[in-house]
Amino acid sequence: MLVTVLGFQSPYPGPGGATPGYLVQTDHTTLLLDCGSGVLAKLGELLPIYELDALLLSHFHHDHVADVGVLQYGLMVHLREGDRSPDQPLPIYAPGQPAEKAAGLTYREATRLVPVDEKSQVTVGDVQISFLRTDHGDGDPCYAMRLEAGGKTLVYGADSGPNTMWDPFARQADLFICEGTFLERYKPAEPHGHLTVRQAAQVAESLACRSLLITHLWPAYTEEEVRAEADVYRTGTCHIARFGLQIRL
């Protein structure tokens, strides 16, 4: 698997930036994990949107789905141009709730919703995908994703608070993409449905993950201060998200 960071900022993109979006490619399959603001422009630097095999959405918060509508519009244009068959709408795997938001993921011949939950087991091309509900949000579900292909395992943690039950879902993942929304100086007094950078590193270390990608970062954070707070992770390589970063598993 080849993982490319298209977007990682939150709650909004910095200048020329993008909120969460990750391209995952194998020899046979091309997937997009989340589709935040600015992600499609970053994706277009690598490949046309009509080459996607599926989009997987963790939840419906704006920073993770802001570009979905323009993706749908773009695919309609490519259908007209003959770049994609109208008999093969792009599947969007996403929570089925809230129902009114999920319903909008089916759009004409461009896209169709495939609802998922913690019991779902999905195969797209040569990638097997399972889901874990995380500690996040206001009651609506948010799902982490475990992708397995070619003997390698990628876990995308989506948004998650400290009460997420990661073991065994993410244990010894070859790459754990984990949010570090807060630096310690911004850590809320009460759990907030998000992790600090230090908490993300502690989770990855406790799970013996072989590598870690810390993401979901405020645009003003520097790589140096994020890395300094992730020093409790020592099992493998710690990556700090940046645009265009590629990690091959």
Image (cartoon, grey):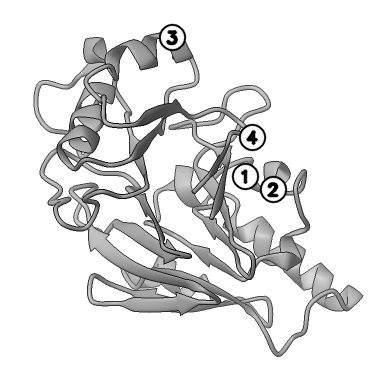
- Report the disc number at residue 224: 3
**Left or right of residue 223: residue 194:** left
What residue did someone put label 2 on? Answer: 43
Mark 1, residue position: 39
Say what amino acid the circle numbered 1 marks.
Answer: Val
**Which is more toward the observer, 205 or 195?**
205
Q: Are marks 1 and 3 in contact (CB under 8 Å)?
A: no
Q: Residue 101: where, in percent of width, then height?
A: 42, 66
Cα distance between the residues tagged 1 and 3 = 24 Å
Q: How many dots with numbers?
A: 4
Between marks 4 and 1, how big is the CA–CA gap? 11 Å
Q: Secondary structure at mark 3?
A: helix
Q: CA distance from mark 2 to mark 4?
A: 10 Å
Please determine whether, in this image, residue 16 is positioned above or below residue 90. above
Q: Earlier in the sequence, mark 4 or mark 3?
A: 3
The residue indicated by pointer 4 is 244
Q: Are marks 1 and 2 in contact (CB under 8 Å)?
A: yes
Of labels 2 and 4, earlier in sequence is 2
Asked if disc 2 and disc 4 are in contact, CB closer than 8 Å, the reply is no
Q: Residue at x 24, y 9 (%)?
A: 185
From the top left corner, tell me how far across and down residue 64 is, in percent: 46, 48
Secondary structure under the numbered disc 2 in the rendered image: helix
